[in-house]
Amino acid sequence: MDIKSIYKEKIITVDEALDKVKSNFEIVCSLGPCEPQLFLSNLHKIKDSVENVSIVTMLSLGKYKFNSDESMKNSFINECTFYSGINRKNHHYGIMSYIP
């Protein structure tokens, strides 16, 4: 099998990726402009089926429902290596944490 065939076998949809997320998972995202924006934009959809999922972001550029809506508190926590304005603004919801 060639490398292109192997790569094609690994491609999944956003919904398939969301189905793989389970309670107590820790998901580490790429830095800034390389973060998985489509995945993070849809993460809130699984709020009722998961608990305590940690999403580690590094200089996140997007505003996402999973880290800006107080109702996500028991499902997700956004642990950040850089506390941007979005992170500081939503800290009081208890869904943000800073990793120094």
Image: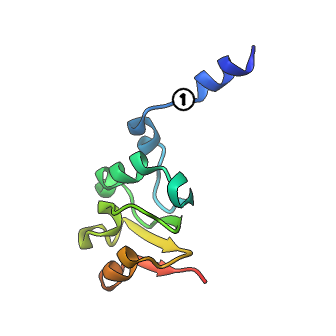
- From the top left corner, tell me how far across and down residue 68 is, in percent: 29, 69
Quarter holding the C terminus is: bottom right
Q: Secondary structure at mark 1?
A: loop
Across and down, in percent, residue 94 comes to 35, 81
Number of numbered discs on residues: 1
Residue at the (29%, 61%) spot, across then down: 65
Q: Position of residue 55 (x, y in %)?
A: 49, 64
Position of 62 relative to 19 (above/below): below
* Left/right of residue 17 with respect to residue 47 in the rendered view: right
Residue 29 seen in the figure: no
Drawn side of residue 7 relative to residue 13, left or right: right
- Please report the residue visible at 68 percent of the width from the left and 22 percent of the height from the top: 6
Give residue 85's quadrant in the image.
bottom left
Determine which residue is flagged by label 1: 11
Please rate how many residues cluster around mark 1, counting C-alpha atoms within 10 Å: few if below 14, some from 14 to 19, many from 20. few
Residue found at x 73% / y 21%: 3
